[in-house]
Image (tube, helix red, strand yellow):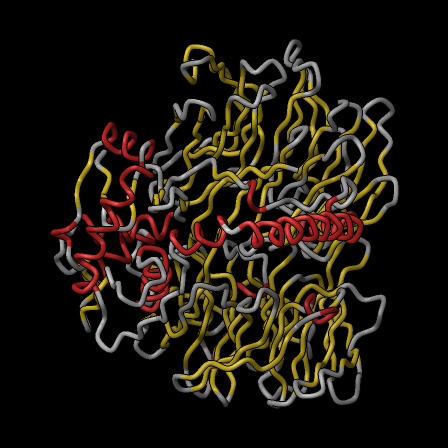
């Protein structure tokens, strides 16, 4: 593959690198690498916005402002922070083009390697070329920076040759050296806590990027000899399983198709086999495949066992002797995940955990380095996670800690600490002190932590991005109304515009979009960061769920008022049309029942009927059951319950809404609009959307619904030394 050489740098698209005059190298994120490559390949011609969106993000369903931000980042790197240089020119209302492409040289890999090895000897030549073309690259009305004043070599030699000055310099040098040593000792004492082995802060200068593909790097594992990296790579075609030799860069793959994809790779302890899950129309199946220095051994692939539902995300692991494997399984949506141990010799398997049925169950785990304990994640009420420790010798379990987030994976850091991530923060829980501490804060979110004796590995980047879309019920059309590079979610239609949650400052915030302006309404920090299912009440207040209880929050003072009793365990609720009442489900003895609360008086009405999500419709209530299909209509006056649709399957209150005589349901890549007539549910239209909607709300006055739409971001696997 050719590399591009300019007067200031060498760009290697394959390595995702910019090599500067001084020999320093800048590793480019995938989006910048793809953008620069597209502009250069156009050979000075204009690249339109849609073409750049396709090249950078793999989709045209993005706002053009996202390309502008990428180009802005790219200009800072390739213009070398010089006001005289502007390699990328904006073509108004069309796109961008690379300026002065005629000065770009194409070099092959052999020439590129030779140039990199001897780049210092070429500095003079390259600087002369830069001086020649910089006037052509200079933007109009450029601000020319003041030059630095540097002493000439002759003046320096004159000073050095003076004997009196030499004596004075010698003394000054001695004093300076003593001062430097003193400062180093002082700094070492002050900074010792920050660089101690207990703190484990990781230097970003020791970060190494291990993957460079366009798309998302998901679950991964490293072989015990640190030679192989196995990881799930998601692109536009699906989720492939790639095997990469870290030292040589050789890559092999098991590639997905429309009806098949892979997940959850794990190496055995002898580095000659890999465990992974295969998802297809047959469900989830666990396989083992042999590996050698060439990659996968297809003739050594064998099925181990069935692992339950397709599309489930669970982890896998070998035991310390590689003669048994651990995995999680659930056979139906009503059954929580349990962890099983499968003997590879006899085929005998048994469950080793028994979670309650009020959450997702036990789905993610990691074996301790000594092979004696299994740390696992237990989902609690579908909204938080508790981390447990299982003694494999005697079967005893104990809870270590709990966090108000859904954890995807954990890892061991030695035999006495658990590593996990929450957004931008990499954390570890010390089993001895029973406390969590920050290991490192990243500029981008991190997931899937992994460790060996001296390194930490994570997948870094924005795994998901989310925009706000609108459904017009009269025209039955959808359109994007809010777009950014952040997670904008959970829209609420209000009189002032659209309220939505965002992570634009690195934590939860409530924003408002009115007209063409977006402003921050309030920070949701501290306890408020845990609030979910937020809705607006009388323009002045918010109503949401905090710790399983319904709360009312003053948007101005941030004062919190509890509306439901402390012992209630509430997952979701719906406001009535006049915002005087709300209906919700509460958990009792692992079953869910519908209740109604009068907001003004606090009067509680217990209907005595099972249900998990509920919506007001006319003077009745539409409801669904916990982990079971079916849409029901309940009359609070007559206490009658009528089945409307036995096949209706939705298990989250945020996934469906009711507006007048319409029911709107969102699921992956689709928004469905149904008519509600005389107790019948009839599909009007199913609209395709380019992503996964998570939350929908509607407004009866405007006759519109708004929903968030999650799409794939871009990530990379990195190694950090500690």
Q: Quadrant of residue 207?
A: top right
Q: Which residue is more in the foreground, 242 or 477?
A: 242
Q: Where is 284 relative to 29, above or below?
A: above
**Residue at figure coordinates x 23%, y 54% from the top left:** 130
Judge whether residue 126 can be spotted in this image.
yes
Tell me the quadrant of the picture where the C terminus can be found. top right
**Residue at figure coordinates x 58%, y 82% from the top left:** 521
Q: Position of residue 622 (x, y in %)?
A: 58, 70
Q: Position of residue 436 (x, y in %)?
A: 78, 49
Quick check: 606 left or right of 715? right
Q: Which residue is more in the foreground, 558 or 18?
A: 18
Tell me the quadrant of the picture where the N terminus can be found. top left
Q: Position of residue 127 (x, y in %)?
A: 25, 50
Q: Which residue is more in the foreground, 53 or 165?
A: 165
- Count every numbered label the image shows and give the total: 0
Q: Which residue is more in the foreground, 506 or 135?
A: 135
Question: Residue reaching furthest front?
Answer: 163
Quick check: 31 left or right of 419? left
Q: Position of residue 407 (x, y in %)?
A: 66, 48
Q: Quadrant of residue 88?
A: bottom left
Quick check: 236 left or right of 565? left
Judge whether residue 686 can be spotted in this image.
no
Q: Where is 563 relative to 174, above or below?
A: below
**Residue at figure coordinates x 19%, y 73% from the top left:** 92
């Amino acid at each position: 593959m050719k590399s591009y050489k300019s007067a200031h740098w060498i760009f290697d698209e394959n390595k995702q690198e910019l090599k500067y005059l001084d020999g320093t190298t800048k590793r480019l994120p995938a989006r910048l690498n793809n953008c620069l490559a597209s502009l250069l390949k156009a050979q000075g011609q204009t690249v339109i916005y849609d073409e750049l969106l396709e090249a950078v993000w793999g989709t045209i369903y993005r706002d053009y402002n996202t390309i502008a931000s990428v180009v802005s980042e790219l200009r800072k790197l390739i213009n070398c922070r010089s006001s005289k240089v502007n390699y990328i020119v904006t073509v108004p209302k069309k796109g961008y083009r690379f300026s002065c492409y005629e000065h770009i040289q194409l070099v092959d890999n052999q020439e590129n390697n030779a140039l990199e090895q001897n780049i210092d000897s070429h500095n003079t030549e390259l600087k002369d070329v830069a001086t020649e073309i910089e006037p052509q690259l200079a933007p109009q009305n450029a601000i020319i920076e003041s030059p630095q004043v540097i002493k000439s070599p002759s003046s320096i030699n004159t000073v050095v040759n003076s004997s009196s000055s030499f004596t004075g310099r010698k003394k000054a040098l001695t004093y300076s050296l003593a001062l430097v040593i003193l400062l180093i000792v002082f700094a070492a004492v002050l900074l010792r806590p920050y660089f101690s082995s207990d703190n484990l802060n990781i230097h970003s200068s020791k970060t190494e990027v291990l993957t460079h593909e366009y798309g998302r790097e998901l679950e991964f594992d490293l072989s015990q000899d640190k030679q192989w990296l196995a990881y799930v790579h998601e692109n536009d075609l699906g989720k492939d399983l790639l095997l990469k030799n870290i030292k040589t860069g050789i890559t092999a793959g098991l590639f997905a198709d429309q009806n098949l994809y892979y997940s959850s790779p794990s190496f055995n302890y002898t580095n000659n086999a890999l465990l992974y899950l295969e998802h297809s129309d047959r469900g989830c199946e666990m396989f083992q495949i042999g590996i050698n220095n060439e990659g996968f051994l297809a003739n050594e692939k064998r099925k181990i066992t069935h692992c339950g539902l397709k599309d489930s995300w669970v982890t896998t692991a070998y035991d310390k002797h590689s003669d048994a494997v651990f995995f999680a399984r659930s056979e139906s949506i009503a059954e929580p995940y349990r962890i099983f141990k499968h003997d590879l010799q006899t085929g005998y398997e048994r469950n080793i955990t028994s979670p309650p049925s009020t959450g997702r169950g036990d789905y993610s785990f990691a074996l301790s380095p000594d092979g004696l304990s299994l740390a696992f994640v237990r989902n609690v009420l579908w909204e938080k996670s508790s981390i447990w420790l299982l003694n494999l010798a005697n079967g005893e379990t104990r809870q270590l800690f709990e966090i108000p987030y859904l954890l995807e994976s954990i890892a061991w850091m030695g035999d006495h600490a658990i590593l996990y991530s929450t957004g931008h923060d990499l954390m570890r829980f010390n089993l001895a002190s029973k406390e969590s501490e920050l290991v490192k804060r990243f500029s981008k979110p991190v997931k899937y932590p992994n460790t060996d004796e001296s390194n930490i590995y994570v997948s870094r980047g924005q795994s998901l991005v989310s925009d706000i879309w609108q459904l017009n019920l009269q025209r039955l059309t959808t359109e994007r109304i809010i777009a950014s590079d952040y997670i904008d979610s959970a829209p609420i239609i209000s009189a002032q515009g659209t309220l939505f949650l965002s992570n634009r400052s690195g934590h939860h915030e409530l924003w408002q979009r009115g007209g063409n302006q977006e402003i921050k309404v309030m920070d949701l920090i501290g306890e408020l960061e845990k609030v979910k299912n937020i809705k607006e009440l009388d323009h002045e207040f918010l109503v949401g769920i905090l710790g399983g209880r319904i709360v009312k929050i003053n948007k101005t003072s941030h004062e919190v008022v509890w509306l439901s009793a402390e012992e209630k365990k509430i997952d979701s609720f719906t406001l009535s049309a006049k915002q005087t009442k709300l209906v919700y489900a509460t958990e009792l003895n692992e079953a869910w029942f519908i209740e109604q609360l009068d907001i003004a008086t606090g009067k509680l009405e217990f209907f005595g009927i099972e249900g998990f999500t509920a919506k007001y419709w006319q003077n009745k209530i539409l409801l669904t059951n916990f982990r079971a299909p079916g849409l029901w209509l309940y009359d609070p006056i007559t206490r009658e319950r009528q089945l409307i649709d036995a096949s209706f399957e939705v298990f989250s209150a945020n996934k469906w809404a009711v507006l007048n005589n319409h029911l709107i349901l969102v699921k992956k890549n689709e928004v469905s609009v149904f008519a509600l007539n005389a107790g019948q549910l009839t599909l009007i239209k199913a609209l395709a959307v380019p992503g996964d909607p998570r939350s929908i709300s509607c407004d009866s006055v405007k006759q519109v619904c708004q929903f968030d739409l999650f799409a794939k971001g871009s990530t990379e696997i990195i190694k950090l030394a500690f």
